[in-house]
Image (cartoon, helix red, strand yellow):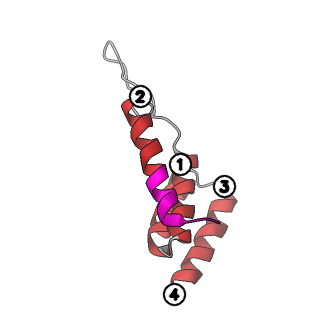
Amino acid sequence: MSGDPALALKDFTRVLNVAIAAGAYSPAEGGDGKAAQSGPDVSGDLRTLAKIYRGNHQPELALLTMLTLHRTNPKISLYMREIADLHDEHR
C-alpha cells in the first residue's frame, strides 16, 4: 500500500461511518417468523482494512482480519497466501 496508512485508516473509518449511517451494514430482517437473510458482503472492506493495517506496520491486526475473512471464504486461495505472508512478516 502506498501513501500514508494512518490517513488511509482515518478515511476508511469515515467511509464506514457514512455507510453505517446509511444502513449499508444492517442485517436483513426476517419478517413473519422467517429467518433473516445473511448480512452484506464485507469481504472487500475487510481486505482493505487488512492492507491498511499491514501498511501501518500492524501485521498482527492484518493477520487477524485476514483469518476472519478466510474463515468466511475458505475457497479463496489468495487469502491463504496473504495469511502466510502476514504470518511470516509477524515472526
Instruction: Identify the residue under disc 3.
Output: 76
Q: Position of residue 45 (x, y in %)?
A: 53, 48
> How much space separates mark 2 and mark 4, taking CA atoms?
40 Å
Tell me, for residue 22, which label it has, or none: 2
Q: Residue at x 58, y 47 (%)?
A: 44
Choose the circle earlier in sequence order: 2 or 1. 2
Which stretch did the figure color magenta? 1-11
Q: Nearer the viewer, mark 2 or mark 4?
A: 2
Asked if the stretch drawn in magenta spans residue 58, the answer is: no
Instruction: Identify the residue under disc 4.
Output: 91
Circle 2/circle 4 CB separation < 8 Å: no
Q: Helix, strand, or loop for circle 4? A: loop
Q: Residue at x 43, y 50 (%)?
A: 13
Say if 13 sits above or below 3 in the image: above
Instruction: Identify the residue under disc 1.
Output: 45
Say if 36 sits above or below 25 in the image: above
Choose the circle earlier in sequence order: 3 or 2. 2
User: Type of residue at label 2?
Assistant: Ala
Answer left or right for 40 relative to 33.
right
Q: Nearer the viewer, mark 2 or mark 1?
A: 2
